[in-house]
Image: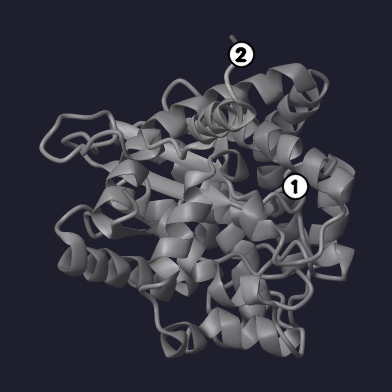
Amino acid sequence: MALPVRTNLRHVFRFIHQLNAPKRYMCAASTENKPSAAEPPGGGRVFSGIQPTGVPHLGNYLGALENWVSLQNQYPSVLYSIVDLHSITQSQDPAQLRNNIVDMAASLLACGIDPERAILFQQSQVSEHAELSWILGCLTSMPRLRHLPQWKMKSKQKNEGSVGLYTYPVLQAADILLYKSTHVPVGEDQVQHLELAQDLARIFNNRYGDLFPEPRALMSSTRKVKSLRDPSAKMSKSDPNAMATITITDSPDDIALKIRRAVTDFTSEVTYDPETRPGVSNLVTIHAAMATISVEDAVSQARGLDTGVYKKLVTEAVIQRLTPIREEIERLRADRAHLEGVLARGTQRARELAAPVLREVRQRVGFC
């Protein structure tokens, strides 16, 4: 005999409720006191990121990427992220952004990043970054963010910055803490952002129990590379003057032209004095770094040369160092499937580290 209609409906509703019941797999079990791949190994864990906003320039290479290659050989666990979530604090064309992400992967591999030694991945593909950023944002005061120098500078340039621009230091902190990173390579202009990550690690640990190590700064010893057209400013991808910036994919002819037109001064002798001779000193910095010699040796090699002839010496050093990188980038760009595969494998490895950490965070916060 058929069941009454009301009874049938009750069974149907119960079945639908069971299907839609929230799953608690994100908090299946505490990772506390359990060994996990998410724990940094004895030698520590390094994390750093770079925005996919075009091909890296000479300053990026000398100030960050060269150091990244060295660090992957010094630490047992290293993660390098293409931080596309950060990049959309400025308006991005979607198709161009997709290409820039793959292009950045090619650039990093060509510069010497080894995906067997370092985890190279795309930030937005690991959703734990965004969730941890929200949780840390709820522990961050507005005055703490308002006083960070980059917000002051960038919001002034745009007249009114976005919420994303305002809170992106919190996302930076999440990037670092999500992997329990112990060391972060930074330049002088990023020290205060790392201090925010340290503060948030302390705040979280004090409120919910020890979980995050306080990451330490790895300061770059490389002198900043300045604009070739305005040596009072650092070299930048966004410089409207194309002659101001050397990219790592520039042809030998382009490199020679840009260095030939680099601003110097009216004294023909080559000396190193960044305060009174910033243009010439910038050339000496570039020469020394690209030829892997000291500033003193670079000045010694320039003895007896005027700045015009010295520029040829600098040009040779830059071309010799960048040519194999440019050629490797061209080779890698021709195999997009390989680049996407490298990022996909890196993303999977990053998720394996991130998931148990966020699971523990969710449990401690009280989400489950």
Q: Nearest the camera: 188 or 197?
A: 197
Residue 284, position as x, y percentages in the image: 59, 63
The kind of secondary structure element at disc 2 is loop
Whole-percent x and y of residue 184? Answer: 37, 54
Q: Residue at x 47, y 89 (%)?
A: 147
Q: Quadrant of the N terminus?
A: top right
Q: On the image, which quarter does residue 261 sit in? A: bottom right
Q: Is residue 185 above or below residue 134?
A: above
Q: Nearer the viewer, residue 308 or 183?
A: 183
Which quadrant of the structure image shows residue 3?
top right
Residue at 75 percent across and 68 percent down: it is: 228
The mark found on residue 132 in the picture is none
Circle 2 residue: 2
Residue named by callout 1: 55
Vertical placement of 301 versus 72: above or below? below
Amino acid at the residue labelled 1: Val
**Amino acid beneath label 2:** Ala
The residue that appears at 40% across and 29% down in the rendered structure is 352
User: Along the line of sight, which residue is nearer the eye, 12 or 317?
Assistant: 12
**How far separated are the C-alphas under marks 2 and 1?**
71 Å
**153 to the left or right of 36:** right
